[in-house]
Amino acid sequence: MPDPTSLPAAAGLAATPDAIVIGAGPGGLAAAAALRQHGVRPLVLERAEQLGASWRGHYDRLHLHTTRRLSALPGLRIPRAYGRWVGRDDVVRYLEQYAEHHSLDITTGITVDRVERGDAGWELPATGGRVLGSPVVVVATGFNHAPHIPDWPGRDTFPGELLHASSYRNAAPYAGRDVLVVGVGNTGAEIAVDLVEGGAGRVRLAVRTPPHIMRRSTAGWPAQASGILVRRLPPRLVDRVAPYIERMSVPDLSAYGLPRPENGLYARVLDGAIPVQDVGLIDAVQSRKVEPVAAVERFEGDQVHLADGSQAAPEVVIAATGYRRGLEGLVGHLGVLDGRGRPVAHGSRTPPGAPGLFFTGFTNPISGMFREMAIDAGRIARAASRISR
């Protein structure tokens, strides 16, 4: 079988597939494997030159915050040798092994800019003037598709280095420097800790909304397992119980500038913000090696003005300010997105008026994204097999 990470652009395009999967990340690969298991011939299209491109581009120290056992995709376990918390490079290796194990038909270097309705289902104008067609299309372009930096007033006047977290690899270039990390999600928290451990001169963490913080594991019990258990419970019940659990496992960091959040844990999850898994942030804040500060409001030259009226003059600003799904150009004209650019349906459900169009990997569940993409894959395959027959 050809190397699935570098198939030539012309590979896999001769025959008409039963389904087209857009994106060769974990969600797309899982969907393709499940489709094959249900007798559907999928073709996976990837705009990058290798599968798993998003994971290849993450910072060096990144590990899954979900356990190896609960993060496997359908049909292949993650090797035990990769450890309980699988690192970035091993995630990439696993995705390569997964594609080979399932003999997936993957074509790299192919960009699909738009999904159109066609006579026999869907048509996809692609790189090189090709128009591909299929009755089933699975959009799996990823939760972290388009890096987003807020349009802060005056940011163009900042003489220092301003970069998105997607461009951060490790702390080496920032040793001895004054760094402001903006955003206290999992990415911002972990980068701040990485900078401290890598010898940055000063690390501040700009916080707009205090996060819920959870230990990644308590007495061997992973936070993910708790997330799975409470997923089906009423959000109000979870929000009532969660504060007691947080107080037992996480110290109050209010004196250090990071107060406990006022809104409920599950209410935040439903709004798209999962809790921060502690990988050293608590100790770094308590030792004052990471200094929480107010949110960024604007830039004036080398001064960064914060929401509480204070100012900072960092040499480097790293914006851990999230991503946009980037689906508007691809499917926005089909009326399948909500007001925030998210698919109105995912998994086995297709949007109204768009039969055969599926989405996976566009939610950020408390139970673990890999786990939910694996579940979605089976559901999509069962629904798609009824359409393609």
Image: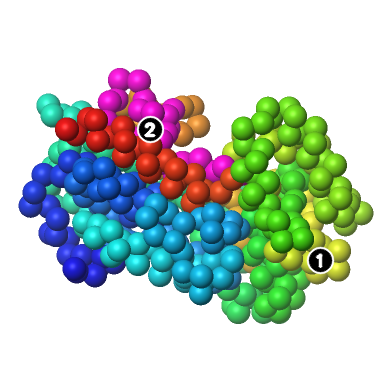
Residue type, label 2: Ser
Q: In terms of image quadrants, where is residue 278?
A: bottom right
- Residue 249 appears left or right of 43: right
Which residue lies most toward the left here? 14
Quarter holding the C terminus? top left
Which residue lies most toward the top here? 353
Majority secondary structure of magenta residues: loop
Nearer the N terminus, badge 2 or badge 1? 1
- Return the residue at label 2: 348
Q: Secondary structure at mark 1?
A: helix
| Cα distance in 3D space between marks 2 and 1 | 42 Å
Q: Nearer the viewer, mark 2 or mark 1?
A: 2
| Residue at x 73%, y 34% (from the top left corner) | 238
Give above or below for 51 relative to 342: below
Q: In terms of image quadrants, where is residue 158?
A: bottom right
Q: Secondary structure at mark 2?
A: loop
As drawn, the label of residue 283 is: 1
Residue type, label 1: Asp
Range of residues picked out in magenta: 343-366
Q: Nearer the viewer, residue 212 or 110?
A: 212
Q: Are marks 2 and 1 in contact (CB under 8 Å)?
A: no
